[in-house]
Amino acid sequence: MKGFFWNCRGIKKKCVSSFLRNLILEHKFHVIGIQETMQQDIRDHLLRQIDPHQSYLWKWIPSCARSGGILSGVHLEYLDVGSFKKGRFILQMQLWDKQMKRKWCFLNVYGAAHEENKRDFLAELANFCGKCTDPVLIGGDFNLIRFTSEKNNGGL
């Protein structure tokens, strides 16, 4: 099983689509989780740029203003998608592994960037995980810190 998770901080930034395309073609990931797309909508044109052979099923959650946004891809040669569920911070896919003949759950996470939404994010994460009866793969950007001193303040 090969997975790729990346906080791209803007999927339409210069060279991002070619970087993703080359990485995807080289590694043939089973699942892909991209966070902070900063896009309200992911158009087919962009998906064809990063997945020219259309080997993946893509689902996304739009960004809120200029932050957030999740894009998940599942390689259809290896996996079938039984269902998917969108939350505010999580995109969940129920998957069937064709080779292992087993179901499992894939969660792509982009946690709340602001302190006032942390409880909502953690409640959503607990809710999603609590409803998964199959093995779970969780990845993404949780935006969680233990102490204020760990926060990146842009070099301040």
Image: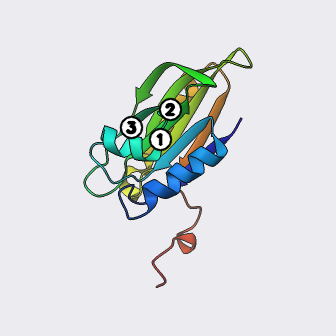
* Residue found at the far bottom of this picture: 156
**Drawn side of residue 20 relative to residue 1, left or right:** left
The three-letter code of the residue at mark 2 reads: Tyr
**How crowded is the residue under tag 3: few (<14 C-alpha within 10 Å), some, or many (20+)?**
many
Q: Mark 1 or mark 3: name the one nearer the start of the chain.
A: 1
Tell me if residue 53 comes above or below residue 34 in the rendering: above
Residue at label 1? 51
**In the image, what residue type sits under mark 1?**
Asp
Label 3 residue SS: strand
The Cα atoms of the two marked residues, 3 and 2, are separated by 13 Å
**Number of dots carrying numbers:** 3
Q: Nearer the viewer, residue 34 or 113?
A: 34
Which quadrant of the view contains residue 105?
Answer: top right
User: Are the residues flagged by discs 1 and 3 in contact, CB closer than 8 Å?
Assistant: no
Q: Secondary structure at mark 1?
A: loop
Q: Residue lying farthest front?
A: 53
Label 1: how many Cα within 10 Å (few below 14, some 14–19, many 20+) = many
Which circle, 1 or 3, is nearer the viewer? 1
The quadrant in which residue 149 appears is bottom right
109 vs 49, nearest the viewer: 49
Residue 77 point in image, percent of width and height: 60, 25
* Pointer 2 residue: 56
- Which mark identifies residue 118? none
Disc 3 marks which residue? 60
Residue 23 point in image, percent of width and height: 59, 51
For the residue pair 127 and 138, the one nearer the viewer reads as: 138
Q: Quadrant of the N terminus?
A: top right
Measuring 51% from the left and 57% from the top, which residue is drawn there?
Answer: 19
Kindly report the distance in space between the C-alpha atoms of the residues bearing marks 1 and 3. Answer: 15 Å
Badge 2 marks a residue whose secondary structure is: strand
| Residue at point 35%, 46% (across, down) | 46
